[in-house]
Image (cartoon, rainbow, N blue to C red):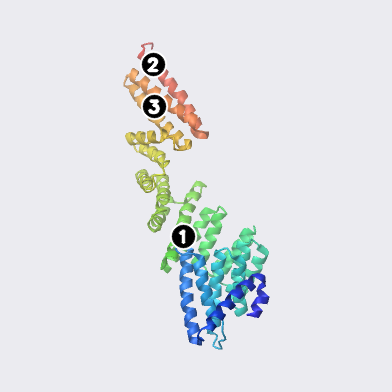
């Protein structure tokens, strides 16, 4: 243990002292055989690793996992000519370092990553951990690059290391180097799901949405072939599907020639896999796709489902109201628009277009009455439309305000004509 104290610094001294105390306590009781130590280390390692995986999605705490992994580590501190305890200690150190890293205990995490290197300098994972710790967490890009390059020398085709180094380059603003690294890695391993996804994410982050889709969709296909065996795999797939759907929507918005119909199956699977608390927002995403491809009834169904799952999505009522108006269901459109327009708890940004829609509906009704020569009723309907447009102009801004003001002028002209016909002036 003394050499660990010298290499690890002040933080290492604290950690190592804890470990030494742990071993001392164990040796005060009956002396353990090598087999007993190995079995005990494996049991506590299994327990600690399980809690570490649970901690990643909030089902356990990192503190619990760290405590259990340290206990496992303590059983490995003994002489073993077979090398079994060294191998166990190395693997435990890797998971312990990661747990400490996730828990914000960076100095302790560094100690264990360096300990992995001491045990086996040919194992790239210690260098890789230091690369992530410095390059991504501490944002020390120079050291991060240095450690990742050492890891890469030991494992040139490792997608995780390539990804990590590319992320360091990306965060450091060396986008050309990052892209070169991704393309180089993909040329060697074109069917690696992790690399395709990482490069797709990189292109997405650069706003190259249409280009990103090629790699994201390939990552999806490769991941499906591999199958999803654990909860964490499902979460990764949900994240990938969300990125694909967003890439389609953003690419289309940017004017790229993409077929949004291709996004519908991804959006459907996203809804199916997502946690119940997340489903509402994904129904909204699929609803947007349906709306953009002209499937308005399907869009309405998705928006209404989202509203059912999350009643706080009140602003969706405006979108639904406009769609009902588009398909000719004026009664439902008017009812929903009125609900939003008169609900003062809703942001004025959404109340304004609701008032504008009410103005449109009332204006059409008034014109229809005018054409039927029901001039008195037409005047009343035009007055109602004017009131709605005035509210839209008052609450709105930008395009909706301009639209409301333009319609106000138009409706006032119609009202004047209807009033003159009603009063038999014309």
Residue 17: percent from left, percent from top:
61, 75
Q: Is residue 230 left or right of residue 181?
A: left
Q: Secondary structure at mark 1?
A: helix
Q: Is residue 306 left or right of residue 131?
A: left
Residue denoted by label 3: 363
Residue 387 found in image quarter: top left
Distance (Cα) linking label 2 and label 1: 61 Å
Q: Earlier in the sequence, mark 2 or mark 1?
A: 1
What residue is shown with label 2? 419
Precedes in sequence: disc 2 or disc 3: 3
Q: Secondary structure at mark 2?
A: helix
The image shows residue 293, relative to residue 238, as above or below, that is above
The residue wearing badge 1 is 217
Q: Locate residue 369, reporting x and y percent.
A: 33, 23
Q: Secondary structure at mark 3?
A: helix
Give the total of numbered labels: 3
């Amino acid at each position: 243990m003394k050499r660990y104290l010298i290499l690890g610094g002040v933080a290492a001294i604290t950690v190592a002292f804890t470990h030494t105390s742990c071993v001392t306590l164990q040796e005060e009781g009956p002396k353990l055989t090598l087999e007993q130590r190995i079995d005990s280390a494996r049991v506590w390692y299994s327990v600690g690793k399980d809690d570490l995986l649970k901690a990643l999605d909030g089902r356990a705490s990192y503190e619990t996992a760290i405590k259990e992994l340290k206990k496992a580590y303590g059983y490995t501190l003994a002489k073993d000519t077979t090398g079994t305890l060294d191998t166990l200690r190395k693997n435990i150190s890797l998971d312990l370092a990661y747990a400490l890293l996730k828990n914000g205990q960076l100095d302790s995490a560094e100690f264990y990553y360096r300990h992995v290197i001491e045990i086996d300098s040919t194992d790239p994972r210690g260098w890789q951990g230091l690369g992530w710790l410095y390059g991504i967490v501490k944002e020390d890009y120079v050291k991060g690059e240095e450690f990742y390059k050492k890891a890469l020398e030991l494992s040139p085709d490792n997608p995780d290391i390539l990804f990590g180094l590319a992320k360091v380059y990306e965060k450091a603003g060396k986008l050309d180097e990052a892209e070169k690294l991704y393309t180089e890695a993909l040329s060697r391993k074109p069917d690696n799901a992790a690399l395709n996804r990482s490069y797709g994410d990189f292109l997405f982050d650069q706003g190259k949405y249409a280009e990103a889709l090629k790699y994201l969709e390939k990552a999806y296909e490769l991941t499906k072939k591999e199958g999803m065996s654990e909860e964490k795999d499902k979460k990764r797939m949900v994240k990938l599907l969300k990125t694909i759907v967003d890439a389609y929507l953003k690419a289309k918005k940017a004017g790229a020639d993409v077929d949004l119909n291709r996004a519908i199956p991804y959006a459907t699977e996203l809804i199916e896999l997502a946690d119940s608390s997340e489903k509402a927002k994904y129904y909204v995403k699929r609803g947007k796709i349906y709306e953009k491809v002209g499937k308005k009834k399907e869009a309405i169904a998705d928006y209404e489902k989202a509203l059912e799952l999350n009643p706080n999505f009140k602003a969706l009522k405006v979108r639904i109201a406009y769609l009902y108006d588009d398909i000719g269901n004026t009664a439902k459109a008017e009812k929903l628009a009125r609900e939003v327009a008169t609900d003062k708890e809703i942001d004025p940004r959404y109340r304004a277009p609701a008032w504008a829609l009410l103005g449109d509906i009332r204006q059409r009704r008034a014109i229809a009455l005018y054409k039927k020569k029901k001039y008195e009723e037409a005047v009343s309907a035009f007055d109602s439309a004017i009131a709605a447009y005035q509210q839209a102009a008052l609450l709105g801004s930008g395009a909706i305000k301009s639209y409301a003001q333009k319609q106000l002028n138009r409706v006032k002209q119609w009202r004047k004509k209807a009033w003159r016909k009603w009063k038999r002036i014309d």
